[in-house]
Amino acid sequence: MQIVELLNNSEAKNKILIPDPLDSDRQFERFHHFDIPNLDDTEIINELHALYPLLWWGLPNDCWLHERVKALNMESYKRRVDTRFGFRGTPKPALSQGVKL
């Protein structure tokens, strides 16, 4: 019975989803998105897939969720574009060396 009440209470959902920065160092880092550079590519994708339906659902006071999705998308884009991260996408073709005579 308590779980059903918890699921129907939107304030309780926000408290579960949004980390409390005063609770621990780990939650402080997550609240301010400092943990994103340490996440793997699959963790970023999994978290994005978990957060998109919550945004579509339209929870009240979902500003932190919007910020989190934006930060995750920017980190994902940065990893795809920047070659220092070694993203395992499609490799660039080698440039031709021309004809040697």
Image (tube, rainbow, N blue to C red):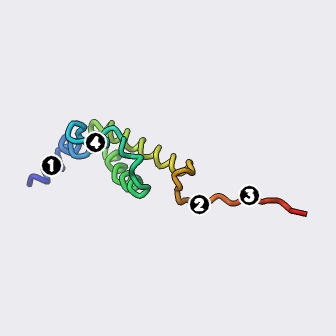
Q: Residue at x 61, y 60 (%)?
A: 91
* For the residues bearing labels 4 and 3, Cβ distance under 8 angstroms: no
Task: Determine whether the residue tagged by mark 2 lies in a helix, strand or loop.
Answer: loop
Which residue matches tag 3? 95
Quadrant position of residue 31 = top left
Question: Which is more N-terminal, label 3 or label 4?
Answer: 4
How many neighbours does mark 1 have within 10 angstroms: few (below 14), some (14-19), or many (20 or more)? few
- Write down the residue under mark 2: 90
Disc 3 secondary structure class? loop
Q: Residue under circle 1?
A: 6
Q: Counting other residues with Cα less than 10 Å from the Cα at mark 3, is it few (<14), some (14-19), or many (20 or more)?
A: few
Residue type, mark 1 in image:
Leu
Give the residue at x 12% y 49%. 5
The amino acid marked with disc number 2 is Thr
- Where does label 4 land, which residue? 59
Tell me the number on the disc at residue 68: none
Residue 60 position within the rendered picture, expressed as x and y whole percent measured from the top left: 27, 38
| C-beta proximity under 8 Å, tags 2 and 4 | no
Q: In front: mark 3 or mark 2?
A: 3
User: Foreground: 78 or 26?
Assistant: 26
Q: Amino acid at mark 4?
A: Leu
**In-image side of 47 versus 17 (left or right):** right
Q: Position of residue 47 (x, y in %)?
A: 36, 52
Q: CA distance from mark 3 to mark 2?
A: 15 Å
The answer to which of 43 and 60 lies nearer the viewer is 43
